[in-house]
Image (tube, grey):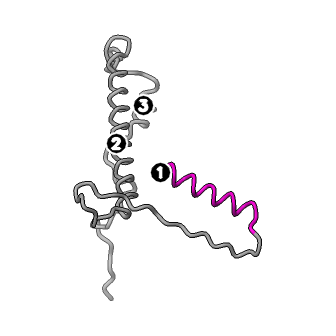
């Protein structure tokens, strides 16, 4: 009689769900609407929500500080490429103005070219 392989009780069993615990929702569903262990709901914050308002104010102030710091860094990056390091006062380096050349490719200048020129000149005057 030839030998036949018979399966034993030591088989691989893949877990259908790895979690050993029930979820909050399944526990609530199995409870059937019954609520256990809840005596009362605690309110966060002080009287009339004063503590929560103070917390919101602190968060707002922190956000304003972050935005101001970010704007300061952006301003430094904008100016950094235009500093004149060869000036006499090394502590207060003068800002070198940007030179912009406008070359018209058309034979006649149009109103749009004049508007662009005016916009660039006005913007450069405001930055100084």
Badge 3 density bin: few <14, some 14–19, many ≥20, Cα 10 Å: few
- Please give the name of the residue rendered at 33% of the width and 72% of the height, measured from the top-left corner: 7
Which of pointers 2 and 3 lies earlier in the amino acid sequence? 3
For the residues carrying marks 2 and 1, which lies nearer the camera in this image? Answer: 1
Near-viewer residue (48 or 80): 80
Residue 114 higher or lower than 75, as above or below: below
Using the rendered image of the protein, determine whether residue 99 is visible from the camera's viewpoint.
yes
111 drawn magenta: yes
Overall secondary structure of the magenta section: helix
Outermost residue on the top side: it is 47
Q: Magenta residues?
A: 109-128
Q: Indicate the secondary structure of the residue bearing disc 3.
A: helix
- Please give the name of the residue rendered at 38% of the width and 63% of the height, measured from the top-left corner: 82
The N terminus - image quarter: bottom left
Where residue 67 appears, x then y in whole percent? 38, 43
What residue is pinned by disc 2?
66
Near-viewer residue (63 or 42): 63
Where residue 75 appears, x then y in whole percent? 38, 52
Using the rendered image of the protein, determine whether residue 1 is visible from the camera's viewpoint.
no
Outermost residue on the front side: it is 88
Badge 1 density bin: few <14, some 14–19, many ≥20, Cα 10 Å: few
Label 2 close to label 3 by CB (< 8 Å) = no
Lateral position of residue 121 relative to residue 62, left or right: right
* Residue 105 quadrant: bottom right
Near-viewer residue (78 or 46): 78
Q: Which mark is residue 73?
A: none
Q: Which mark is residue 127?
A: 1
Lateral position of residue 25 relative to residue 87, left or right: right
- Please give the name of the residue rendered at 37% of the width and 64% of the height, measured from the top-left corner: 81
Residue 35 higher or lower than 117, as above or below: above
Residue 122 higher or lower than 83, as above or below: above
């Amino acid at each position: 009689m030839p030998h036949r392989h018979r399966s034993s009780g030591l088989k691989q069993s893949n877990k259908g769900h790895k979690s050993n615990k029930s979820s909050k929702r399944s526990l609530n569903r199995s409870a059937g609407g019954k609520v256990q262990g809840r005596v009362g709901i605690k309110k966060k914050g002080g009287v009339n929500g004063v503590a929560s308002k103070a917390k919101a104010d602190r968060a707002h102030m922190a956000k304003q500080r972050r935005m101001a710091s970010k704007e300061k860094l952006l301003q430094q990056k904008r100016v950094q490429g235009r500093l004149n390091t060869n000036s006499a006062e090394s502590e207060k380096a003068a800002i070198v103005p940007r030179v912009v050349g406008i070359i018209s490719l058309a034979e006649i200048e149009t109103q749009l070219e004049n508007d662009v020129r005016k916009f660039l000149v006005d913007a450069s005057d405001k930055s100084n």
